[in-house]
C-alpha cells in the first residue's frame, strides 16, 4: 500500500515544479536564482515534494523514431476474467516495448501503449507474446498515426 503524506503546495513549490517540468536537469542553483531563494531551500523543497509523492522521479525522454521505433500503437485487452489482471500485468511487464498499461473501465479490461520498429514487429509482439498470455481473451489494436499532444500536467 502506498504511504500518503499530507503536503500542501505553496507558490514557491509550484514555481519550482514548473521550472523542473520544463527542464528536469536544471541545476538547483539556477532554480534558486529564478525563485530568489537559496540552493539549500530548493533542495529541501524538492526533497519534501519527493517524500510527499508529488514528484515521482525525473527522466530523459527519448524520441522513439530516432531510436528506430516507428510504430506506436494502443492495444485494448479483454480479459477472460477480472481475476487474471495481476497475472497478465506480470507477463506484460516482461515485454519491453510496452511503455504504459492501465486497468480500465469500459469496453476493455486493460489498455496498453506499445512502440515497435514497424508493423511487422508489432504483429510479432501481438501474436507471439501478448495474445499467448493466459487470461487474455482477445485484443484490439489501434495504430497511432501522429502524437499531437504529449505533456505533463500543468502546475496551477
Image: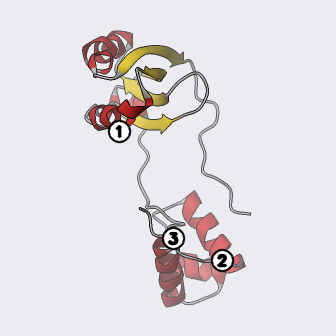
Crowd around label 3: few <14 · some 14–19 · many ≥20 (10 Å): few
Q: Is residue 58 above or below residue 74?
A: below
Whichever of callouts 1 and 2 sits on the residue coming sooner in the sequence is: 2
Q: Where is residue 68 in the image (x, y as percent from the top left)?
A: 34, 26
Q: How far is disc 1 from disc 3 in space, using C-alphas?
A: 23 Å
Crowd around label 1: few <14 · some 14–19 · many ≥20 (10 Å): few
Screen quadrant of the N terminus: bottom left
Q: In this view, does 30 lie above or below 37?
A: above
Looking at the rendering, which quadrant does residue 117 occupy?
top left
Q: Position of residue 26 (x, y in %)?
A: 49, 68
The image's mark for residue 86 is 1
Q: How far is disc 1 from disc 2 in space, using C-alphas?
A: 33 Å
The residue labelled by disc 2 is 8
Q: What element carries label 1?
A: helix
Q: Where is residue 103 in the image (x, y as percent from the top left)?
A: 49, 36
The image's mark for residue 11 is none
Q: Which residue is drawn at 42% across and 25% down?
A: 81
Please tell me which residue lies in front, 47 or 60: 47
Q: Residue at x 60, y 68 (%)?
A: 17
The image's mark for residue 4 is 3
Q: Is residue 18 above or below residue 112?
A: below
Of discs 3 and 2, which sits in the foreground? 3
Please tell me which residue lies in front, 6 or 10: 6
Q: How far is disc 3 from disc 2 in space, using C-alphas?
A: 13 Å
Q: Is the C-beta separation of discs 1 and 2 under 8 Å?
A: no
42 lies left or right of 71: right
Looking at the rendering, which quadrant does residue 127 occupy?
top left
Amino acid at each position: 500500500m502506498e504511504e500518503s503524506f499530507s503536503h500542501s503546495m505553496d507558490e514557491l513549490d509550484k514555481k519550482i515544479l514548473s521550472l523542473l517540468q520544463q527542464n528536469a536537469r536544471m541545476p538547483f542553483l539556477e532554480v534558486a536564482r529564478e525563485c530568489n531563494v537559496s540552493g539549500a531551500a530548493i533542495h529541501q523543497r524538492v526533497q519534501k515534494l519527493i517524500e510527499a509523492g508529488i514528484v515521482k522521479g525525473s527522466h530523459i525522454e527519448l524520441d522513439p523514431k530516432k531510436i528506430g521505433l516507428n510504430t506506436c500503437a494502443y492495444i485494448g485487452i479483454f480479459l477472460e476474467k477480472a481475476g487474471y489482471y495481476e497475472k497478465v500485468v506480470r507477463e506484460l511487464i516482461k515485454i519491453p516495448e510496452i511503455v504504459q498499461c492501465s486497468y480500465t473501465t469500459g469496453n476493455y479490461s486493460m489498455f496498453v501503449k506499445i512502440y515497435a520498429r514497424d508493423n511487422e514487429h508489432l504483429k510479432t509482439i501481438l501474436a507471439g507474446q501478448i495474445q499467448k498470455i493466459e487470461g487474455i481473451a482477445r485484443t484490439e489494436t489501434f495504430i497511432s498515426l501522429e502524437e499531437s499532444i504529449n505533456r505533463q500536467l500543468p502546475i496551477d
